[in-house]
Amino acid sequence: MTNRQKAHLQFTLNGEETEVAFAPHKTLLEVLREDLNLTGTKHGCELGECGTCAVLVDGRSVLSCLMLGLDTEGRRVETVEGMADEGGLHPLQETFADTGAAQCGYCTPGFLLVAKELLAQNAKPSRKEIKEALSGNLCRCTGYVKIYEAVELAAARMRGEEAELPRESVYGYE
Amino acid sequence: MATNNGHGNNGDGRGPKTKGAGARPEDLKVVGKPFRKVDARSKCVGATKFADDISLPRMLYCKILRSHVPHALIKAIDYSKALALPGVHAVITGKDLPIPYGILPVSQDETALCVDKVRFIGDPVAAVAAIDEDTAFDAMNLIEVEYEPLPAVATIEEAVETSEPRIHDYGDYNNVHKTVHLEFGDMDEGFREADVVREDVFFYEGNTHLPMEQHAAVGHYDADGKVTLWSSTQTPHYVHRALAKTLEMPAAHVRVIATPNGGGFGGKSDPFNHEIVVCELSRRTKRPVKVTLTREEVFYCHRGRHPVLMKSRIGVKKDGSITALDFQSFLDGGAYGSYGVASTFYTGALQTVTYEVPRYRFRGLRAFTNKPPCGPKRGHGTPQPRFGLEVQLDKVAEELNLDPAEMRLKHLVKPNTVTANYLRVGSMGLGACIEKVVEGSDWKNKFRKLPEGRGFGLACSSYICGAGLPIYWNSMPHSGVQLRLDRQGGVCVQCGSTDIGQGSDSVLAYVVAEILGIDPFDIRVVTADTDLTPVDLGSYSSRVTLMTGNAAIQAAERARELLAKAVAEKLSVPVDNLSFAERRVFDVENPEVGVSFPEAVVLAESKYGTIGTVGSYVPPRSPGRFKGAGVGPSPAYSYSAAVAEVEVDADTGYVNVPRVWVAHDIGKSINPMLVMGQVEGSIYMGLGEALMEEMVYRENRNVVHKFPSLLEYKSPTTLEMCDVFTYLVEDADPNGPFGAKEVGQGPLLPVMPAIANAVYDAVGVRIDEVPITPEKVLAALRAKRQGKDARYGPTRTPSPAWPDPLKVPTPAEGGDGKEMPRVAVHS
């Protein structure tokens, strides 16, 4: 049994000032899931290999399984639970849901946050830029195709354009 | 409760005829439309509760000690130090859970924890429950196990030849688990008729599912003596049976809830040791117990693609028509039975449903080896022989100087026929699939016409839409659906099926919404809970859309009938005049005369009492009557064709796949967008299998997994994934709900052979095994330069003792599906 005293952390979590006490060796992933009950952040390896546990710290994507909880003292952490607000889903969440970019949905939170980071830096990324930005996230269900399409659709809508999926993305080619 | 409680009319062994299939496409309001999945938004806001997201008050955490030796007798286990560690509540070993189990009735060869011997590195030996994961981990490491090592069996050949030690004390002989020998028709005559006879040897390396979610489970034995298991499983019904058996509890006291699966692909289809272990630890500690496997442990759970060595002998006429096919497969099964007997039969079942094969012989052998057990992965037992067959046909076409696409098109199996091995083919859209990819890829201007280093390859395939027979013999439905209609208009669909990301919950909602004329998002879907939902056998063998879809149609039509009668009486309109659409029930001739859907439910409930209906589905009976005819039959077969484009770097051997064109005969899309997602995901997974994914072992006689990690087990990232051009062919099948067939597995199958064929087109070397790694391409290019056989792949197969063939005359020979009597031989 671990007998170490708990550490105490203050940080901004999904826009709210948050305090939490936890065993000091815990990763940010563990603090979020186990001590704050925010289970939207998933894990696929806990070794920094799959991108599933990605969250944003001060707006930059990090693998929460490789970051100590203690290292987020005073910083701004955003998880998938913080993407939607009273106004509804984030455009990325909406397009991921509407296009089938989330199949099993397990890798989805990580993809959403990395995509959000991308769109904050580049409002109109090319397909190649999307692939590069998302290359650290593994998905076994979708073949990534619907994910690219969801990111492109959300980006267009965030730019104020009226956009829909191309017909062949939904029904296939004639 | 139910006023209409009839079961599927299976008196003749056939399922209910689906009226849904007769609906005119222009009348459909939900089916065929790209609705989002009913659970999609929860998944995108992080609200979906996967198994590891469950946390119960006073919950303990479990860790499982696994064997670090491949094959050994357990001489002693001392866990006193572990039990003495503060925070540890229980330690159990094999003696505490000695009852064997396994997915197949013929392979009850696992125990939750090894009793007297371990069979592979990763085999579970003891389990700990403690107040947190760290404590459980420390305790696990304090358990002392004394092993007496046994020689390990590492390969198929060793398994065939090694009489002692045997990994299991059952099986055909030595370390051979199972042999099969089936012969359909006069093979000698078939090969005599041939203008060309080829014999090729292929190898398909094993690979694993790699779901992003590691397996996890929570067991809770409550104060009233009942146990509940939440688990990331594709088959809650089979887990339910295994728990009742191994825990020695009445099944009625066991509840299994399959949590949404974070990816399955077949890897969560077996009942698993950790599921039994957490229930037993909970029974002992009277507290909930959770286990979450590490990624490394997921590699040991495995049940993935069998490595298969194959020899295919084919006779063809000059026009490319097949006169006879003689196929042998050798499967490396790993340490346990799992689905392996079925896998073995599947490596010999579906060779006949694409192109006409008038005479067919199949020999299959599954070996036990001291490696993680193999089982079903997407395509279960069929990608390996399909790879061999489609590459061999490419060689045949070249030898005969025929275009491989045209050659295939000429000899397709005809719809509504029975194959030589007694598979009944219904709808058959492969011709249209081939035409789509040939046209879309500009095949005629590309194949054999591109510069050195670039190539095009084509391959086709077929897959079942659910198995015709259940895993354990019974005559009950394969799928059941229960509907409850609430007097305020709510509709609840209950079904045992498990959503593993493919969208099966949504399919239930779409089908019911279509028939009751309501919105799919009005419907509450309750699935995969053995206390609340009727049995569905599970999410495997691409059975769910077809089987639950048909059951849902039957339940919904029964509910509609009750509502229609009540509304007809109220409105004084003939029942047949009533239509259900846009949340209303109305007179089609006079649409303003009608009631809202909730009013219709109130009328029906007032007339009949509480409204609940059920539907069920039993597949049609297969024409095969011989022993072994149970694997291969299906209510329908899906078809796929693919063209792959490759770029091969002759200096590095690296193969890049920029594009794949794929056409899939879906029958009818219940939701085209979800079908597209399944096709794209299949191409992706096939690309990984074709180029990089492999289970590789090292040292200790080659039985230690080389790299049980997501980093070292290579799978395609966004940077490797190809562009996909998809065509959906809708050749409605009368057995499918609204005509629908499967899509989850079939489109994966043509990818590997299409890429291998394209590599040949690009650089003129044959890579007769997957994955097609740079090393293999370079070796083949080197052989080509040296004037040797421009090929990489196996050259020989073992020559085991085969059982006498079970001879079955083909339908064309006047056979009735039964085997010929064996001549008794007395020594």
Image: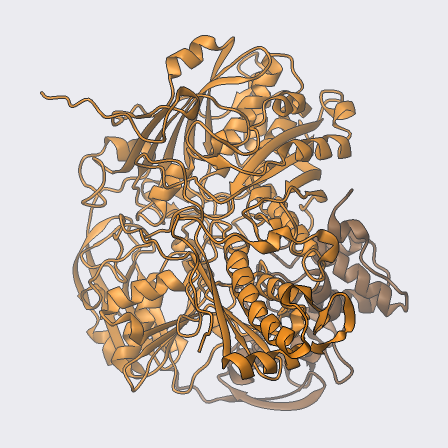
Chain colours: A brown, B orange
Give the total of numbered labels. 0
- Residue B320 lies, in percent from the top left, at 58, 16
Where is residue A16, by image quadrant? bottom right
| Residue drawn at x 27%, y 57% as measured from the top left | B101
Q: Is residue B635 above or below residue B249?
A: above
Q: Position of residue B542 (x, y in %)?
A: 51, 50
Q: Picture coordinates of residue B52 (x, y %)?
A: 48, 72
Report the residue at 29% width, 57% height from top. B67
Work out whether residue B376 or residue B249 is closer to the camera in this orientation and state it: B249
Q: Is residue B579 above or below residue B404?
A: below
The answer to whether residue B397 is left or right of residue B137 is right
Location of the C terminus of chain B by quadrant is: top left
Quarter of the image for residue A147 reads bottom right
Left or right side of B420 for B113: left
Residue A83 appears in the figure: no
**Nearest the camera: B609 or B731?**
B609
Note whether B165 is above or below B785 in the view shown. Answer: below
Which residue is located at x 65 percent, y 35 percent? B642
Give residue B457's position: percent from left, percent from top. Answer: 66, 28
> For the point 53% across and 56% down, which residue is it?
B550
Q: Nearer the viewer, residue B529 or B578?
A: B578
Q: Quadrant of the N terminus of chain B?
A: bottom left
Residue B820 visible, this orientation? yes
Q: Nearer the viewer, residue A137 or B802?
A: B802
